[in-house]
Image: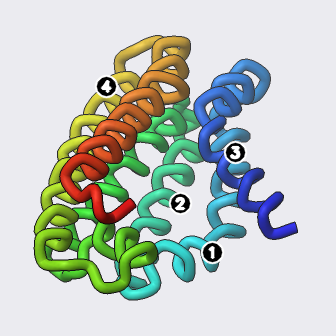
Amino acid sequence: MAAWRARARAALALGYPVAIYCALLWFEPRVVAAALVVLLLMRQRVYAQRYLSELSWVSRGILAALVLLCLLALALNDERLVRLYPAALSAAFLLVFGLSLYYPPTVVERIARLRTPDLPDAGVRYTRQVTRIWCAFFAVNALIAAWTALWATREVWALYNGFFAYLAMGALFAGEWILRRRRFPEAR
C-alpha cells in the first residue's frame, strides 16, 4: 500500500502542469488555487518529516511561501500566480540544495550514503560538485518556469513545465549517473 501511495504522489507531482492546465480550462484560477491550498495543508506534515527533517524551519518557510502564493492567486483570481508553483518549487529545491552546501552533508551526499555509508573523501568532494550542478539547474529551471508562468501562453507553460523541465532533469540525472559510474567504477 505504501508503494502505491508513493507512486501516486510521484504521478501527481509529475502531472502537476497537465492537471493545472486542465483545471484552468474548467475552473477559475481562484478555485484551482483554493484546491492547491487544501492539498498543501494536507501535505504539511509529510513535507516536514520526509524532506527536511533537519531543516524544519526551511520546510515551514517553503510551505508558507507556497501557501501564500496560492492564497494570493485565490484572492486575485490570477492564473499566472497558480502557474508560478513549479518555479516556486524549483526555487525551494535550490534553497534546500544550496543550504546543504553550507550545512553539510549535502543533499547528494546524504543520498549517496544510503548506498555507500563509508563514502570516501573523493566521494564527498564529488557529491559537493554534483550538488552545485543541481543548484545551477534549479536556478535556471526556476527562471524559465517563472518566465513561462508570467509571459508565455498556458500551452507553452504546460509544455515546458510538464515535459521539457522533466526531460532536462532526467538528462542531468542520467548524465551524472554515467559520469559517476566511470569516475567511481568500484561503487557499482
Q: Residues within 10 Å of mark 1 (few under 14, many from 20)?
A: few
Q: Which residue is mark 3?
A: 12
Q: Secondary structure at mark 3?
A: helix
Q: Which residue is mark 4?
A: 147
Query: Which is more toward the observer, 112 or 19?
Result: 112
Query: Which is more toward the observer, 32 or 176?
Result: 176
Which badge, 1 or 3, comes first in the chain's sequence?
3
Say which of marks 4 and 1 sits in front. Answer: 1
In the displayed structure, 185 sits above or below 54; it is above
Q: Secondary structure at mark 1?
A: helix
Q: Residues within 10 Å of mark 3 (few under 14, many from 20)?
A: few
x 13%, y 58%: residue = 129
x 48%, y 43%: residue = 85
Q: Which residue is mark 2?
A: 67
Residue 66: percent from left, percent from top: 48, 57
Cα distance between the residues tagged 1 and 2: 15 Å
Residue 96 appears in the rendering: no
Which badge, 3 or 2, comes first in the chain's sequence?
3
Residue 150: percent from left, percent from top: 37, 25
Which badge, 1 or 2, comes first in the chain's sequence?
1
- Amino acid bearing label 4: Trp
Cα distance between the residues tagged 4 and 1: 29 Å
In the displayed structure, 4 sits above or below 99; it is above
